[in-house]
């Protein structure tokens, strides 16, 4: 008599599709006269999907840097987490591509740092294997290669002095190659012997930039 009552069905204990588990769901219905339909019960299982990919941002560091140098940061792609709100934990694990795990430390939040000083000429690439685990126990493992970047002492050239007078001269120089790192200071060294070194006996220096 009341027609289609689908819109008035009452669902008890609705399913949360973002929370894995087993849900006991019941459906109740009452018509306009107060008659109750037979209650229907269903068991709904929501399964957690494993992360589908592990992403490395960075993945390289300069040679000759101290232990604790940042080498990269990891994040995860998860088909259950389109809004990227899940919490993931990361760890180095044994397996294919894990030969150099001991050369790095990986925080649970995905921050990768060195535990030693690297030399490009000795080894330029390191293999690690990382596991990402979501808050419901699903995980994915991926191998990665961390690159060590070649760095060297800057190359410079001393140019001929100009405007040379009895007590003054204009000195010029040129930086030929920065060596791949940020320059902290540059200037001139003066000494009575060829190739003066900073701090050497009879050597005077002054900075022209920093």
Image (spheres, helix red, strand yellow):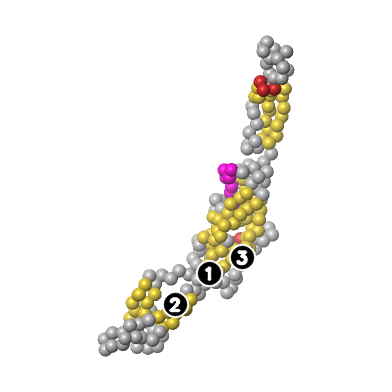
Does residue 67 belong to the magenta stretch?
Answer: no
Which is closer to the viewer, label 3 or label 2?
A: 2
User: Which residue is at the far top?
Assistant: 33
Q: CA distance from mark 3 to mark 2?
A: 32 Å
Q: Earlier in the sequence, mark 1 or mark 2?
A: 1
Q: Is residue 133 above or below residue 2?
A: below
In this image, 51 relative to 70: left or right?
A: right
Name the residue that disc number 2 marks: 175
Say whether marks 1 and 3 touch (CB < 8 Å): no
Name the residue that disc number 1 marks: 63
Say whether marks 3 and 2 touch (CB < 8 Å): no
**Magenta residues?**
83-90
Measured as percent of width and height from the top left, residue 129 is found at 64, 58
Q: Residue at x 34, y 79 (%)?
A: 205
Measured as percent of width and height from the top left, residue 183 is found at 43, 71
Q: Is residue 114 above or below residue 39?
A: below
- Label disc, if present, on residue 126 of the rendered structure: 3
Q: Secondary structure at mark 2?
A: strand
In this image, 184 relative to 33: left or right?
A: left
Does residue 84 belong to the magenta stretch?
Answer: yes
Give the crowd class for mark 2: few <14, some 14-19, many >=20 residues within 10 Å. few
Q: CA distance from mark 1 to mark 2?
A: 21 Å
Query: Residue 120, can we see it?
Result: yes
């Amino acid at each position: 008599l009341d027609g289609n009552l689908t819109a008035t069905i009452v669902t008890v204990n609705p399913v949360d599709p973002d929370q894995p588990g087993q849900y006991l769901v019941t459906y109740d219905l009452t018509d306009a006269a107060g008659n109750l339909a037979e209650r229907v019960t269903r068991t709904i299982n929501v399964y957690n999907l494993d992360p589908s990919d592990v992403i490395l941002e960075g993945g390289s560091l300069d040679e000759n840097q101290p232990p604790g140098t940042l080498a990269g940061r990891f994040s995860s792609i998860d088909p259950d987490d389109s809004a990227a709100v899940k919490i993931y934990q990361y760890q180095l694990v044994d397996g294919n591509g894990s030969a150099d795990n001991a050369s790095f430390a990986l925080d649970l939040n995905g921050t990768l740092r060195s535990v030693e000083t690297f030399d490009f000429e000795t080894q330029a690439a390191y293999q690690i294997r990382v596991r990402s685990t979501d808050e419901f126990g699903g995980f994915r493992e991926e191998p990665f290669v961390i690159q060590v970047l070649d760095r060297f002492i800057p190359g410079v050239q001393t140019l001929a002095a100009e405007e040379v007078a009895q007590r003054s001269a204009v000195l010029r120089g040129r930086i030929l190659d920065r060596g791949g790192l940020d320059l902290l200071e540059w200037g001139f060294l003066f000494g009575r012997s060829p190739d003066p070194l900073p701090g050497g006996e009879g050597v005077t220096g002054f900075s022209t930039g920093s």
